[in-house]
Image: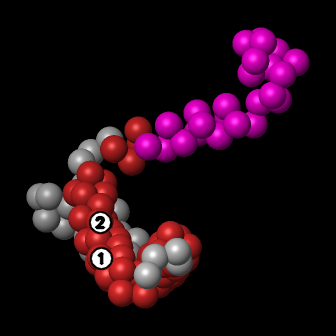
Amino acid sequence: MGAGSSGMVFPGALPPGAFAPGQVAAIVLVDVLLAGDNALALLLLAAPLAPAARKRALAVGLGLAVLFRIVLATLAGALLAVPGVSLAGGVFLLGTALAMARPEGAARRGGGA
């Protein structure tokens, strides 16, 4: 083993930065679902417009949606490469889940049940 290796070898483990086909498929599925949501919202917003304006609004809206998705996915990938960001995100999500699980009355009173 080299000087920089951890000494642990996991069968079938991917090298750092590599994605398993299942991970890529999951990301693509979520992206398609979100794109469908954007398209539905754009259609509802553009419905009252004149046909020419509707066509332009849909083209601009879908183009900006794709651009924002690419920019935000790149930003998310860069942030996840920073040590500790995943841990901080997990702690935040755990706190949010615990706050949502509390009974509504206890949250208003600031105390127990």
Dot 1 surroundings within 10 Å: few (below 14), some, or many (20 or more)?
Answer: few
Q: Residue at 70% across / 37% down in the picture?
A: 100
Residue 40: image location, x then y, percent:
55, 76
Q: Residue at 29% across / 61% down in the picture?
A: 72
Q: Residue at 54% across / 42% down in the picture?
A: 93
Q: Which amino acid does label 2 sit on?
A: Phe
99 displayed left or right of 34: right
* Residue of label 2: 68
Is 81 contained in the magenta span?
Answer: no
**Segment colored magenta:** 89-113
Dot 2 surroundings within 10 Å: few (below 14), some, or many (20 or more)?
Answer: few
Residue 29: image location, x then y, percent:
51, 81
- Quadrant in the rendering for residue 6: bottom left
- In the image shown, does 42 or 108 lie closer to the viewer? 42
104 displayed left or right of 60: right
- In the image shown, does 55 or 91 lie closer to the viewer? 55
* Residue of label 1: 60
Residue positioned most to the right: 113
**Marks 1/2: CA distance?**
12 Å
**Main SS category, magenta section:** helix
Q: What element carries label 1?
A: helix
Q: Which mark is first along the chain, 2 or 1?
A: 1
51 displayed left or right of 65: right
Residue 87: image location, x then y, percent:
41, 42
The colour scheme used to paint the residues is secondary structure
Query: Is the C terminus in the top left, top right, bottom left or bottom right quadrant?
Result: top right
- In the image shown, does 12 or 57 lie closer to the viewer? 57
Q: What residue type is labelled 1?
A: Val
